[in-house]
Image (cartoon, rainbow, N blue to C red):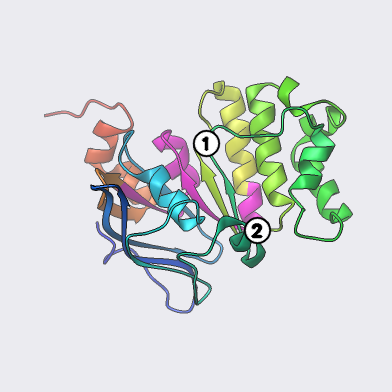
């Protein structure tokens, strides 16, 4: 499986990354990778710590600048555009670590997600609270007092208030109990069904590939595998390296 063999429907491409290189000083962290996200897809980026997943996602969201290559969103070149402007074209990023505003209430955090609009969309706010009933229960509670799972829900809900067309999720299951992880991924599916495309960085490969339409595997800044979620789940290399399965010799 490779980028060339994963199905690409021209005209349906929302995010197109071509020959992307990212450097930290003299170190090339991303070495000329190409991938795409079609409209309505969930695409997973997999790999070990240090493989370049988060660096790739931060470059797509404008937090890092590419050294070479191009990033196109809905036909428009966006490499070099700062993050606050990318929100205006429909790209919202939920970074690793959640980064909720700890002294603001749940309500205030959600309203901050809609900062690019004159006023929050009340219908959307109600929908977000329906997606995350725990947030409705803690609506007046400070963000910093929430549990880890609740903060993750708040970070995702805040991003949804920005009306994203593409949602970037970085390690949404990190540090969460298995039951909460299941809930988070059920919500990820629901968000996608609502029409939001998702680029998902996740170390829980089984969960990620279960929800993903397609996936890419990064190793030391290079793409080494690509395929549908089902194909990657069945791949012996993925099963051994990321799913903890011992394969018969």
Taking the image as shown, residue 47 lies to the left or right of residue 181, namely left
The answer to whether residue 35 of the structure is visible from this angle is: yes
Mark 2 residue crowding within 10 angstroms, few (<14) / some (14–19) / many (20+): many
Residue that carries the numbered disc 2 in the rendered image = 164
| Among the two numbered marks 1 and 2 on one chain, the one whose residue lies closer to the N terminus | 1
Q: Position of residue 185 (x, y in %)?
A: 57, 38
Taking the spot 54% from the left edge, 41% from the top edge, the residue there is 95
Q: Position of residue 234 (x, y in %)?
A: 30, 43
Does the magenta run of residues contain 197? yes
The span picked out in magenta is 190-217
**Residue identifier under label 1:** 96
SS at mark 1 in the image:
loop
- In the image, 93: left or right of 72? right
Task: Examine the structure image and report whether residue 212 is included in the region drawn in magenta.
Answer: yes
Residue 165 visible (yes or no) = no
Q: Residues within 10 Å of mark 1 (few under 14, many from 20)?
A: some
């Amino acid at each position: 499986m490779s980028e060339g063999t994963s199905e690409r429907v021209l005209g349906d491409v929302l995010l197109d990354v071509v020959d992307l290189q990212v450097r930290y000083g003299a170190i090339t962290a991303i070495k000329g990778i190409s991938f795409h996200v079609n409209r309505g897809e969930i695409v997973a980026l997999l790999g070990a710590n240090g493989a370049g997943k988060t660096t790739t996602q931060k470059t797509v969201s404008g937090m890092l600048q590419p050294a070479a290559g191009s990033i196109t969103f809905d036909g428009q070149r966006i490499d070099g555009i700062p993050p606050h402007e990318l929100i205006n074209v429909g790209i919202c990023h939920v970074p690793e670590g959640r980064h909720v505003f700890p002294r603001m209430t749940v309500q205030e955090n959600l309203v901050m997600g809609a900062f690019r609009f004159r006023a929050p969309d009340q219908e959307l706010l109600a929908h977000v609270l329906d997606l995350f009933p725990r947030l409705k229960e803690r609506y007046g509670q400070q963000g910093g007092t929430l549990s880890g799972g609740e903060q993750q829900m708040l970070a995702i809900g805040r991003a949804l208030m920005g009306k994203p067309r593409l949602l970037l999720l970085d390690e949404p299951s990190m540090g969460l109990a298995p039951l909460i992880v299941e809930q988070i991924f059920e919500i990820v599916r629901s968000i996608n069904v609502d029409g939001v495309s998702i680029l998902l960085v996740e170390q829980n490969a089984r969960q990620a590939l279960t929800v993903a339409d397609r996936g890419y595997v990064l190793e030391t800044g290079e793409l080494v595998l690509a395929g549908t979620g089902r194909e990657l789940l069945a791949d012996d290399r993925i099963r051994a390296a990321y799913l903890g399965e011992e394969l018969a010799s």
